[in-house]
Each structure stands twice: as structure tokens, then as C-alpha cells.
Image: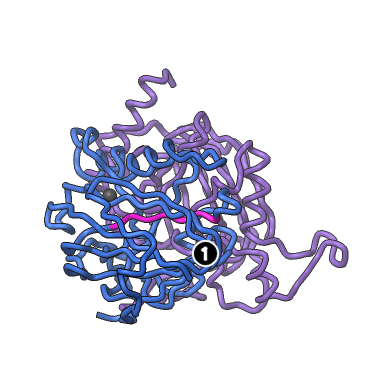
Chain colours: A purple, B blue
Amino acid sequence: MTTVWSKTINPGDKWSATISKGRLLRFTALRDDANLAMMLFNAFDLTERYNMPDTLKAQYTAHLTRGNVLMSDNGRALASIVEDELGWHDTISGLSTRAGTDTKYGATNYQQLRNEWLHSGYENMAVELVRCGLAIRDLGPVVNLFAKVNCDDEGRMIYDVSHCKEGATVMLRTDMDVLIVLSNTPNPLNPSVSYPASSVQMEVLEAPPLDPATDYCYNFRGENRRAFENTAEYHLLAGR
Amino acid sequence: MTAFVRYESKLQAESAVIDEIVLAGDGWMKELLPGQVIRIVDLEGNQAADTLFFDAENPDDHYSAVATITGQSNIYLTTGSILRAESGKELLKIVADTCGRHDTVGGSCSAQSNTVRYSHDKLHMHNCRDTFMLQLAKHDGGYNYTKRDLAPNVNFFMNVPVSPEGGLRFADGVSAPGCYVELESLCRTMVLISNCPQLNNPCNAYNPTPIRVLVWNP
Ligand SMILES: [Zn+2]
């Protein structure tokens, strides 16, 4: 596999780009306790985007790991998790906000701290969405890569502080041309009183061609197969 | 049943300013003023009322399922739950609940997700997101709502248990005929309801039924 490109996304950083289908995105936590919030859109129709409920319902899961497909609101496979050392990525906790960040870590601003001031997930996403021609109306649930949040029988949400260790990796494959928007900001349920400080390395590699006969994500569930079939139909008609 | 704060309302139907029946497969879209209270009644039991909210003063800021559950650190909604917008703004508070936990992780059904969940030949079947989009298309209130505004919603009366191991399933309804949920609007809030027409899963016994919507002035 050839690495096309790589970048380190530091704590507080945001980033977005269009990535073509058929590539692998390998994310590596460079310190313990990473959290990288991610949104995905169809690069050619930004009204089509990652849909958390559709993704979870179709795969009867409340967390994401290897085999899971990230589905769009139009019933298509945007990307799939092809390798995962962690076994759990959160998609129900959303983004940190300015109010939450100030409350938890203390109010900061650029005037005093210059670029050391603390970024929030909501503001990072808002900036990148507007930059890409979108708006806060396009905000929705994110995938919080590296984070584990589960629920007890009463529904109480529990953030696992020991889940993500330095060096842990997860690898996604793009199944459509996607706009990806990333924010390296704390999970809102992380109880740590200091702003988490894990950089994340992102590498883009060429993926081998998807073989429906043997592909793990394609064959993970009948639901996943049908989402891939919907994607194939879209590409056939659009000539992509 | 845990995570259920049963609280009965003292409001009487006779004093409501709105009292309407929404048939299965139909939609309802109206703005609430601050302090107004809305009650949604599951008339025949085991129905799902898929409901979205918007900050009517800034409709770009829609209801956020994840901000709501993270804000209360619990995935189920019941009496006392604060429903939040994406920005964190408090839109409504659940002030009465005779049903049980309400789901906000499962979202609404759509033609496209039906093809994924059930089979490709379900594409033609009526669904909640079509109802939402028809209501948005017919809305004439100075803001051009589009599909972009459709965020994950609340499923009143739906039971979607999440296990500690991270599983998710669709359990028998916890609702019964006459059960209701009541919410007080904390600001100007647009309410968008789809009374779910789903015929592909057993949560409503394959029999979608009407709901009743009442609104009281403060
Ligand atoms: Zn529905």
C-alpha cells in the first residue's frame, strides 16, 4: 500500500478536505486518550451526509468498530471501518461546546493565550462547515474516533478514561468521494480536568479494489451489502 | 422500568388552545411560544411520534439528539429532560410523562434506510422523512427549511434499549393506550411531528395508529 499523504492533527486543530473513493484513512493516536470528531458528506452533494441513527439501527449497534459501515441519510455506504485496534468508537456524544470548554478547563481567549487558547468542537466544525459552503444547520452527530462511551442499564453514559492508548490505530476506507471534516477536540463526556493533549496522525493510502465476494465490511451484515449496492447504483448512474 | 420519572399533568383538555388528531402517516408543524405546553398522546398504544424541534428565532439551530443526551449524561428521555439545540440552547423541558423512556438515538425511518434495513423493494413505502419533507415544503414562515435541517429526532413512545456492551435493539413498546408526554417550550420553538407509518417492524404491531396533540397557553 502506497501512502499518498500524511498529516498530524494537533489538539485543538480542525481540518477538512475532499477525499476520493477507494482510499484508506489510517488514524493513529500519538498519545493516550485521543478524540477526533469526524463528519462525512458526499463530496458531490453536500446535502447527503453521515447519518448516525441510520448507521446504528441498520447494524444493531450503539458503537462503531471493524466491519461497520458509516451510512448516509440516502442509504449509501460513505466509508467503512476496515481495521480497528480499539474495538469501540463513539458516535452518540457529539461535540464539545464553548460553554462546556470554558466551564471544564477555564475560560481562555486568543488575546491572552494566542494560539494556545482552547478550541471547542462546535466552533471548529462551524468554521470548517462555513468554509466548505455549509452552515451550522448542517451540524449533526459526529464520529468520535478513539473514544468509548457506553451506557448502563439505566441509560447513564460512561466515558472510558482508559480506552485509548498511545499508538492505537483505526483505518477507514472511503466508499464514496467524501468531504471529511475533522476536529481534534475533547469528547464532551471526558471527565479530565485538563484539556486532553493527544495529537492524531492521519495517513491516506491507496486501497486495494473492493471485492464484494470477500470484503469484510461488505459481508458484515445483509444491511451493509444493500448499502454498498445502493452506492454502486449511485456511481453507475452518475458515471463515477 | 428504569430511567422513567412518571409524572401526571394537571392540565385539562378543555382548556387547551389546540386539540388535534394526527393520523398515522401524517405530519404536524407549528410554532410554540415561550411557556406554552404541548402534550402528545399515544391514543391506541405502541405508536411512535417522530418529532423534531427548531429554535424558531434561529432555525439553523435545530434539535440535537447528542447534545440533549450528553447534556443529561443519559440516553433516555423522561420527565425533567431538557431538550437542547445543536448550540446547546435549551429548547424545551419534559414536564410530564406517563409512558416511560423515550428514544432519541434511533432517528426516523426513510425510504432509503428502509432499503438498507429491510430490502430494496421497500423504497416506495411511506415513511417519516417523507412526512418531514412534505411539512417543510409546505411551510411558509420566512425560513426555507430543507433536508439539511433534518437532524436526528426524538421518538416519543419508542423503546430502543442500548446495552452496556454497546448493542442496540428495538424492544416492545413501553407505551399503552392513552399514555402521553408533555413538554414546556422554553423559547419560541418550531415543532415538526411525523406520526410514523412504519409497516416493516413489530414495534407498533404493524399497525400505525393516530396520536392527539394538545397545546396550552402559559
Ligand atoms: Zn417512521
Looking at the rendered structure, the secondary structure element under dot 1 is: strand
Secondary structure of the magenta portion, mostly? strand
Which residue range is magenta in the image?
B49-55
Residue A220 x %, y %? 27, 47
Q: Is residue A142 visible?
A: no
Please give left or right for residue A43 compared with residue A111 in the image: left
The quadrant in which residue B187 appears is bottom right
Residue that extends furthest to the right in the rendered view of this protein: A111
Q: Give above or below for B55 relative to A229.
A: below
Query: Relative to the observer, which residue lies in front, B70 or B181?
Result: B181
In terms of depth relative to the viewer, which is nearer, A161 or B144?
B144
| Tag 1 residue | B91
Quarter of the image for residue A199 reads bottom right
Image side of residue A28 versus residue A112, left or right: left
Residue in front for this viewpoint, A225 or A29: A225
Q: What residue type is labelled 1?
A: Leu
User: x%, y% of residue B71?
Assistant: 51, 71
The residue lying at 52 percent from left, 61 percent from top is: B33
Residue B139 at x, y percent in the picture: 45, 40
Specify the quadrant that holds the N terminus of chain B.
bottom left
Q: In this view, does B86 lie above or below B93?
A: above
Neighbour class for label 1 at 10 Å: few (<14), some, many (≥20)? many
Residue A159 visible in the shown view: yes
Is residue B142 in the magenta section? Answer: no
Say which residue appears at 52% left-offset and 31% top-offset: A20
| B171 vs B147: above or below | below
Say which chain tag 1 marks. B
**Residue A193 position within the rendered picture, expressed as x and y whole percent measured from the top left:** 64, 79
Query: A7 and A99: which one is in front?
Result: A99
The residue at the point 44 percent across, 74 percent down is: B81
